[in-house]
Image (cartoon, rainbow, N blue to C red):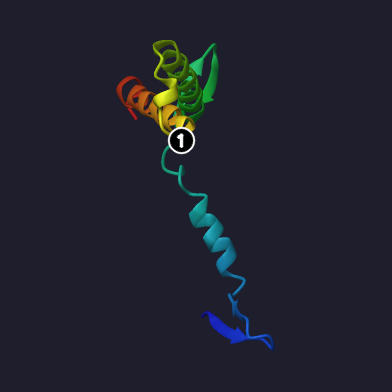
Amino acid sequence: MIVWKSDRWGVCRSRIPACWFPLAGTVALSGCASRSAPAIVLFGAYFPGWLLFGLLAMATAILARAAFGFAGWAESVPFPLFTYLAIGILVAGAFDLLWLGH
């Protein structure tokens, strides 16, 4: 039961029972309980799938920046950081869906 109480300065504060915190932690941390997190075997070691996704997104964003600069389009790109990041995320997402099958 959540009880809202106003203190002397008019600020409302809640009193949440202490037994709810372990339950909230259990629910928040049970995302990968039924199945392990996606991992990729590289050089005999397991790497998380999100790490490969992030590295591929960064590399693609850098390559997109170089390609746009070489083509002379870099000055005409609105919000370049977000544009190149979006290109990197799109390519990495397509790679993740097609090659890794997640």
> Quick one: 48 or 73, which is closer to the camera?
73
* Residue drawn where x is 60% and y is 86% of the image: 5
Judged left or right of residue 24, residue 73 is left
| x and y percentages locating residue 57 in the rendered image | 46, 25
Location of mark 1 (residue):
36
Q: Amino acid at mark 1?
A: Ser
| x and y percentages locating residue 68 in the rendered image | 41, 17
Q: Give the answer, above or below, for where 49 lies relative to 99.
A: below
> Quick one: 73 or 97, which is closer to the camera?
73
> Quick one: 80 or 34, which is closer to the camera?
80
| x and y percentages locating residue 25 in the rendered image | 56, 57
| x and y percentages locating residue 22 in the rendered image | 58, 62
Residue found farthest to the right: 8
Residue found farthest to the left: 98
Residue found farthest to the bottom: 8
Q: Give the answer, above or below, for where 96 lies relative to 79.
A: above
